Image: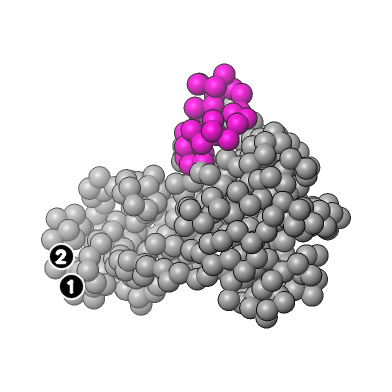
């Protein structure tokens, strides 16, 4: 990447952008405060979630845990229950650890500087820059996907949008302007433009406040930027769930796998290299050792696909009615109380389908 702007050119672009942002920005609860705790919660929720989807979760989270102390002192299962539906549950676990770190190691004072914020569990460069600039006015550019897209199009810059080197170069382009303009407004203006106008597909260039400076717009190449690097194909995995139930209770257990859904509840599971048919399942060693003779087969589902960012799960479930309870290390849970337990979205889908909840 070659730099294609100087300080004066950047200021010429960012001044009208900041004015547009202050006049047109969306009204969002975390924008009416400089409280770093609220900013942090919003940024973590919005990492993998659109604003309109994340807003009710943000409100619920702040209502349940209004302070860093309340989050630090909360039971992990309660945090996961409040987070339920957002996915990427490791974010919630990381927030809990970070909150405990702030309370126990930082004397309950939220870190203010970018370098100190990076010490918090689950806080990367983007989140640290957002908190430092928005809450404390630090001159640290935020470079998320929206900002990469906006700057790439403005200056016709080619580079891998996930490359740390490319993002550092973009940050270096923006940073000098923060000696002249409010760092928070610069960062939020660029992010807002990317979120509302300079969209990945079908950008609304006519309404763009900086279109007269946009080289991609002038060259009719907006859709070609930023450069798209082909992603690695997500790993395919196969889940065979056993629903052991008397339609008042069901067997579940706490998942401890480090890869996905750690500390979430799920039905007994056989992970294999394929989805079984019922006759194959009942001959499987796991089924024989855990449930044979104590349950009666009722029915099986079709295979359905559940997509995560780095996994594609092909799932299927088999319903068994109980003849004799033998929990075999599983928890016998009342179906009417399942909503009290943190469960992944996939398990919630299965639960609702079987028990019509």
- Residue 53 percent location from the top left of the image: 64, 59
Relative height, residue 300 to residue 285 (above, below): below
Residue at 62% x, 69% y is 156
Secondary structure of residue under mark 2: loop
**Number of numbered labels in the structure image:** 2
Residue at 58% x, 66% y is 157
Left or right of residue 160: residue 50: right
- Residue 296 percent location from the top left of the image: 24, 66
Between residue 88 and residue 112, name the one nearer to us. Answer: 112
The quadrant where residue 270 appears: bottom left
Query: Looking at the image, which residue sits at the far top?
Result: 107
**Residue at image mark 2:** 284
Q: In the rendering, which numbered label is found on residue 280?
A: 1
Secondary structure of residue under mark 1: helix
| 118 falls in the magenta region | yes
| 60 falls in the magenta region | no
Q: Spatial distance from mark 2 to mark 1, Cα to Cα?
A: 6 Å
In magenta, the rendered stretch is 94-123
Q: Residue 62: in sight, yes or no?
A: no
Relative height, residue 82 to residue 347 (above, below): above
Q: Residues within 10 Å of mark 1 (few under 14, many from 20)?
A: few
Query: Looking at the image, which residue sits at the far bottom?
Result: 220
Between residue 285 and residue 211, name the one nearer to us. Answer: 211
Residue at 72% x, 77% y is 218
The quadrant where residue 154 appears: bottom right
Residue at 51% x, 56% y is 166
The quadrant where residue 86 appears: bottom right
**Badge 2 vs badge 1, beta-carbon distance below 8 Å:** yes
- Residue 279 percent location from the top left of the image: 18, 75
- Residue 161 percent location from the top left of the image: 52, 62
Q: In the rendering, which numbered label is found on residue 30?
A: none
Between residue 203 and residue 4, name the one nearer to us. Answer: 4
């Amino acid at each position: 990447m070659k730099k294609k702007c100087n300080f004066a050119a950047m200021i010429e672009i960012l001044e009208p952008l900041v004015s547009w942002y202050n006049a047109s920005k969306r009204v969002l609860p975390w924008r009416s405060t400089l409280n770093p705790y609220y900013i942090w919660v919003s940024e973590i929720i919005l990492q993998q979630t659109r604003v309109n989807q994340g807003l009710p979760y943000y409100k619920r989270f702040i209502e349940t845990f209004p302070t860093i102390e309340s989050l630090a002192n909360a039971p992990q299962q309660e945090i996961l229950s409040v987070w339920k539906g957002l996915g990427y549950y490791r974010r919630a676990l990381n927030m809990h650890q970070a909150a405990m770190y702030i309370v126990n190691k930082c004397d309950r004072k939220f870190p203010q500087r970018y370098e100190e914020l990076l010490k918090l569990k689950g806080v990367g460069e983007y989140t640290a820059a957002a908190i430092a600039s928005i809450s404390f006015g630090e001159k640290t550019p935020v470079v998320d996907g929206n900002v990469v897209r906006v700057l790439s199009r403005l200056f016709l810059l080619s580079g891998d949008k996930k490359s740390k080197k490319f993002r550092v170069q973009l940050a270096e382009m923006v940073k000098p302007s923060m000696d002249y303009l409010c760092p928070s407004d610069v960062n939020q203006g660029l992010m807002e433009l990317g979120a509302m106008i300079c969209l990945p597909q079908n950008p609304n260039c006519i309404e763009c406040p900086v279109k007269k400076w946009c080289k991609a717009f002038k060259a009719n190449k907006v859709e070609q930027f930023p450069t798209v690097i082909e992603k690695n194909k997500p790993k395919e995995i196969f889940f065979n769930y056993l629903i052991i139930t008397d339609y008042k209770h069901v067997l579940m257990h706490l998942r401890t796998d480090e890869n996905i859904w750690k500390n979430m509840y799920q039905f007994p599971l056989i992970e294999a290299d394929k989805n079984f048919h019922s006759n194959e399942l009942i001959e499987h060693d796991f089924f024989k050792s855990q449930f044979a003779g104590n349950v009666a087969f009722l029915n099986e589902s079709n295979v359905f696909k559940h997509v995560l960012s780095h996994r594609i799960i092909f799932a299927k479930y088999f319903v068994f009615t109980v003849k004799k309870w033998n929990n075999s290390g599983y928890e016998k849970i009342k179906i009417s109380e399942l909503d009290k337990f943190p469960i992944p979205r996939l398990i919630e889908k299965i639960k609702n389908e079987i028990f019509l909840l």
